[in-house]
Image (cartoon, rainbow, N blue to C red):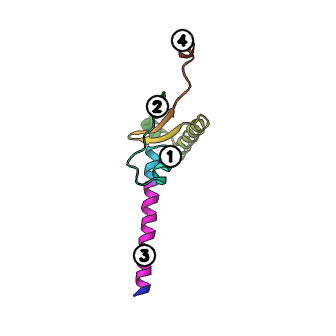
Amino acid sequence: LARISTHLRARDAHFAELDNSRSTQILSRLVPQHVIAQLRSNPAAAMVVEEHARACVLVCSVVGFHTLSQTIPSSDLVHTLRKLSESLEGLSSAHGCSIFEAGRHPFVVMSANPVADPGEQAAG
């Protein structure tokens, strides 16, 4: 009986770990990593609130994707999308931005406190 109880506890722990992994994957598509870290460090927190003087959101879609997918081999399409994604991730990382998925748009980039418009700086 003790062996069965131990096995059941191990199985439950394994399923809990899988659920945690899935939750992290879903969260990382929706919110920046530092927000996930805050939620993980304080599970009792109902929300994470941040306030920024400036924010920027860039939403990108691949124009002509349907036509492209019908005219080039699948392997070329996947390679092209991977290169596009890696380039956007590199640019976002270099500029301190966060990427996440939002609905039908595969690429959404967010930046809090982006650099002000040069015209705005001159006026201020």
Q: Quadrant of residue 83?
A: top right
Q: Amino acid at mark 3?
A: Arg
Q: Which circle's residue, 4 or 1, is located before the other in the chain? A: 1
Q: Quadrant of residue 63?
A: top left
Q: Which residue is mark 2?
A: 57
**SS type, badge 1:** helix
Give 100 or 115, whichever is nearer the viewer.
115
Q: Are marks 3 and 2 in contact (CB under 8 Å)?
A: no
Q: Amino acid at mark 4?
A: Ala
Q: Position of residue 24 (x, y in %)?
A: 46, 54
Q: Residue at x 42, y 40 (%)?
A: 49
Q: Which residue is mark 3?
A: 9
State yes or no: residue 108 in magenta. no
**SS type, badge 3:** helix
- Separation of residues labelled 3 and 2 (CA atoms): 44 Å
Q: Nearer the viewer, mark 3 or mark 4?
A: 4
Q: Are marks 4 and 1 in contact (CB under 8 Å)?
A: no
Q: Nearer the viewer, mark 4 or mark 1?
A: 4
Q: Amino acid at mark 2?
A: Val
Say the numbered circle drawn on residue 123: 4
Q: Amino acid at mark 1?
A: Ser
Give 13 or 38, whichever is nearer the viewer.
38
